Image: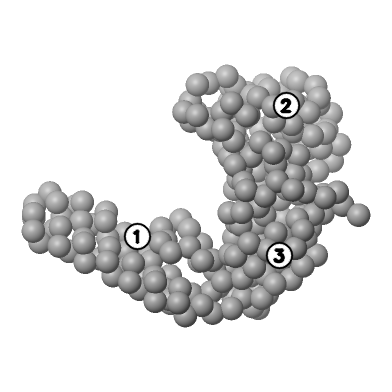
Amino acid sequence: MTLTRGRRSPDLTRVSRNPSLLAKRLIAGSGFMAASLGLGAALGGFYWLLAGVVAIPGAFTLLAAWRPFTAPCPACGALLGDGLLHLPDEPVMGADAVDLRCRACGAYVDCLGGGVREVPFNRCLDAPGYEVTFALEHFAAVRWGARCVACGDDATRALRLARFEVGVLSGFEATLDGAPDGAHVPYCAKHGDASDPAGRAVVVARSPGRVEVQLSLYAAYRAFLDANRALADVAVKAMREAE
């Protein structure tokens, strides 16, 4: 498969059961649980709290073992769902999984009825959740495009991000007084006036050495990712223009 640019991937892939993944997760999950119990029993007291923390990935990995499903990503062909350990905030591949992120290309997919498709471009989350991460030294070169990140219409203005060393850059301290020049977050005349990141449909958060961008509109996310794929923290960089 070849990852397309500017449009939804047309491919449909199928979910299949992977017995070896089931066995590996059972072994890994059981190992964490055994280590947790051993730690608590051997040291007691405060260490039971630490044992509880160790047990969390073990418990969720054991739960995920009963859904040992994988599928090729319809956008790039990488295998989805083959992760060994699972944490509470990580979705598990299955017939009803939605908004599952491909760690190879960054596309999000839905798994419905045993088939896997890239999510619709018009899907908009209640709060920003489609995410892509950049190394801090690359973020200055990021291009935002000329369409509103909230609805996809032509932008007429832009949000200037706050200049914090650490924290949310698209919050109250950001100002909607820029020109839609591609270097700032673009908005149409109807969007961007909210003062909180959820209302602005974008979260830009800086931590030491990293900047994470989250968007609510999938079309805006995909366009942003495609435009900055050479800078983003994803593996697939070879692109072809839409036909």
* Cα gap from disc 2 to disc 3, whole angstroms: 31 Å
Q: At which x and y percent is residue 8? A: 79, 58
Q: Nearer the viewer, mark 1 or mark 2?
A: 1
Which comes before the other along the chain, label 1 or label 3?
1
194 vs 58: above or below: above
Residue 73 quadrant? bottom right
Q: At which x and y percent is residue 169? A: 58, 27
Q: Secondary structure at mark 1?
A: helix
Residue type, label 1: Pro
Quadrant in which the C terminus appears: bottom right
Q: At which x and y percent is residue 226? A: 74, 44
Q: What residue appears at the point 66 percent right and 76 percent down from the top-left corner?
A: 14
In the image, taking residue 9 as reference, residue 205 lies left or right, namely left
Which comes before the other along the chain, label 1 or label 2?
1
In the image, taking residue 193 as reference, residue 69 lies left or right, namely left
Which residue bears the numbered disc 2? 184
Q: Secondary structure at mark 3?
A: loop
* Cα gap from disc 1 to disc 2, whole angstroms: 39 Å
Residue type, label 3: Pro
Q: Nearer the viewer, mark 2 or mark 3?
A: 3
* Cα gap from disc 1 to disc 3, whole angstroms: 28 Å
Residue 178 quadrant? top right
Q: What residue appears at the point 33 percent right and 67 percent down from the top-left corner?
A: 29
219 vs 29: above or below: above
Residue 74 is tagged as 3
Quadrant in which the N terminus appears: bottom right
Rate crowding at label 2 as few (under 14), some (14 to 19) or many (20 or more) other CA atoms within 10 Å.
many
Which residue bears the numbered disc 1? 57
Residue 156 quadrant? top right
Residue type, label 2: His
The number of callouts visible is 3
Q: Nearer the viewer, mark 1 or mark 3?
A: 3
